[in-house]
Amino acid sequence: MTTISPLIAGNWKMNGLTHSLDELAELARLLTTGASPRAVVVICPPATLLAAVAAQGASSGILAGGQDCHMAASGAHTGDISATMLADAGAQYVIVGHSERRTDHAETDDIVRAKAEAAIGAGLKPIICVGETEAQRDAGHAEAVVSAQLAGSIPDAAEQHEVVVAYEPVWAIGTGRTPSLEDIAAIHGAIRARLVERFGERGETIRILYGGSMKPQNAREILDVENVNGGLVGGASLLAKDFYTIISAV
Ligand code: PGA
């Protein structure tokens, strides 16, 4: 069996001002004074804090990631940020295709794939998000929806480059609700099967994160599920103490 080193990524979303770096300092203190973490730790702050997080996190092994990138390397796209810029600011990862981007900015699988390609081109590791809505789950279509998103959103380059998949059921994000452990196992198993079908042996080693209301209280049992190789954590990543508890649950 292939062992995959787990990854815990914090997605701060549109939260965080300069004083939030105090929370990062506290996380660094916890990580360097406690038992050394068994997970790769990534913080994806708003772009305004990215360079500071990358610089400040370096001494404690905390890596920085962007929350989105444009598919072009540069150009006339007011307000957008390219993968090259994220890398230049010190990022090593970037989230693409988060459900909030898919909804708020009408991002399709084609757009998400192009962003993932841009990320790889800039030397970043894309964290590619997929997940069904509540209506799709209720209709029994969760697996089909996620399979289609995987097929459309993951670039062929994943065969030679590191990508991360994050399964985030839309109805679990920020709601305090999570799927049952059986449902998580079923869908992560299905994602693994799709990755192996498409990428062969390489597909065995691609990390599949769970995201959606992961908290200190449920992290351990979710992270224990087969084919869950870490977590993408929103709300609970904003407080160092909570995020550290989740990291320690690995
Ligand atoms: P949540 O968000 O942990 O607050 O549910 C997860 C995410 O959107 O990545």
Image (cartoon, rainbow, N blue to C red):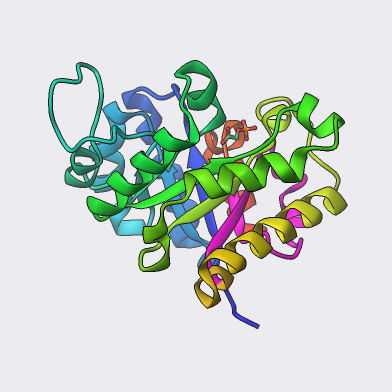
**Residue at image location 62% in from the left, 58% down from the top:** 248
Residue projecting furthest to the bottom: 1
Name the quarter where the N terminus is drawn: bottom right
Left or right: 148 in relation to 202: right
Comparing 17 with 189, the one in front is 189
Relative to residue 11, is residue 116 depicted above or below? below
**Magenta stretch in the rendered image:** 205-232
Name the quarter where the C terminus is drawn: bottom right
Comparing 27 with 208, the one in front is 208
Image coordinates of residue 99 in percent, x first then y, are: 56, 29
Image coordinates of residue 223 in percent, x first then y, are: 70, 58
Image coordinates of residue 49 in percent, x first then y, are: 29, 31
Left or right: 90 in relation to 146: left
**Residue at image location 42% in from the left, 66% down from the top:** 159
Relative to residue 184, is residue 104 depicted above or below? above
Comparing 27 with 115, the one in front is 115
Whether 207 is among the magenta residues is: yes
Left or right: 156 in relation to 80: right
- Let me know if residue 9 appears in the view: yes
Ligand 1 located in image quadrant: top right
Image coordinates of residue 129 in percent, x first then y, are: 54, 41
Whether 182 is among the magenta residues is: no
**Residue at image location 58% in from the left, 42% down from the top:** 149
Q: In which quarter of the image is residue 123?
A: bottom left
Residue projecting furthest to the left: 75
